[in-house]
Amino acid sequence: MQLSAAPYEERLTAPRTWWLISFLVGVSMALILLPFGTLPMLGGLAGGTAVAAVAASSYGSVRIRVVGDSLIAGEAKIPLAALGEAEVLDAEGARAWRTYKADPRAFLLLRAYIPTALRVKVTDPQDPTPYLYLSTREPERLAEALRTGKPA
């Protein structure tokens, strides 16, 4: 039996400039270790670049998926039945909901380098979380996947 593909899946990868910054961290480490010789300098370049690249990669490895009857956003797994209306947020609306309109009880999957987001109300009365704020590059597609995946 073959599993069906997820109706929605997105990986919130780090922007390309972060990889350049990772290399610059390695160059900085190389310059710091330059007085100790060529071999430590090369080790600093390789080690500094590798550590910074691992940090950028792990931060950018978070996924948002709609699989079966669940929304999986990072470490959170929420049944679609517990979710209410989804609101697509443009860049200005997303900024407002992650700053002065934000509720401290909300679940935020926030990536500042992604300008758009989706705000989904939580309708489960047992859950103190009022809404989910999900940074996404395709908020309309995610909202549609949530609508089509909900039980009637």
Image: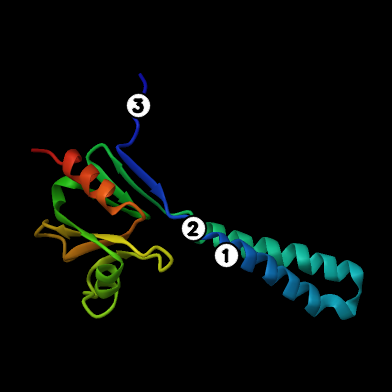
In whole angstroms, how far apart are the C-alphas of marks 1 and 3?
A: 35 Å
Q: Amino acid at mark 1?
A: Trp
Nearest to viewer (mark 1 / mark 3): 1
Q: Residue at x 22, y 49 (%)?
A: 143
Q: Residue at x 52, y 58 (%)?
A: 58
Neighbour tally class for label 3: few under 14, some 14-19, many 20 plus, Cα within 10 Å:
few
In whole angstroms, how far apart are the C-alphas of marks 3 and 2?
A: 26 Å
Residue under label 1: 18
In whole angstroms, how far apart are the C-alphas of marks 2 and 1?
A: 10 Å
Report whether 37 appears left or right of 83: right
Residue under label 3: 3
Residue under label 2: 60
Q: Residue at x 60, y 59 (%)?
A: 54
Q: Secondary structure at mark 3?
A: loop
Quarter holding the C terminus is top left
Q: Position of residue 71 (x, y in %)?
A: 27, 47
Q: Are marks 2 and 1 in contact (CB under 8 Å)?
A: yes
Q: Secondary structure at mark 2?
A: loop
Looking at this view, is 36 or 60 the one in front?
A: 60
Q: Amino acid at mark 2?
A: Gly
Q: Secondary structure at mark 1?
A: helix
Dividing the picture into quarters, in which one does residue 102 lie? bottom left
Q: Are marks 3 and 2 in contact (CB under 8 Å)?
A: no
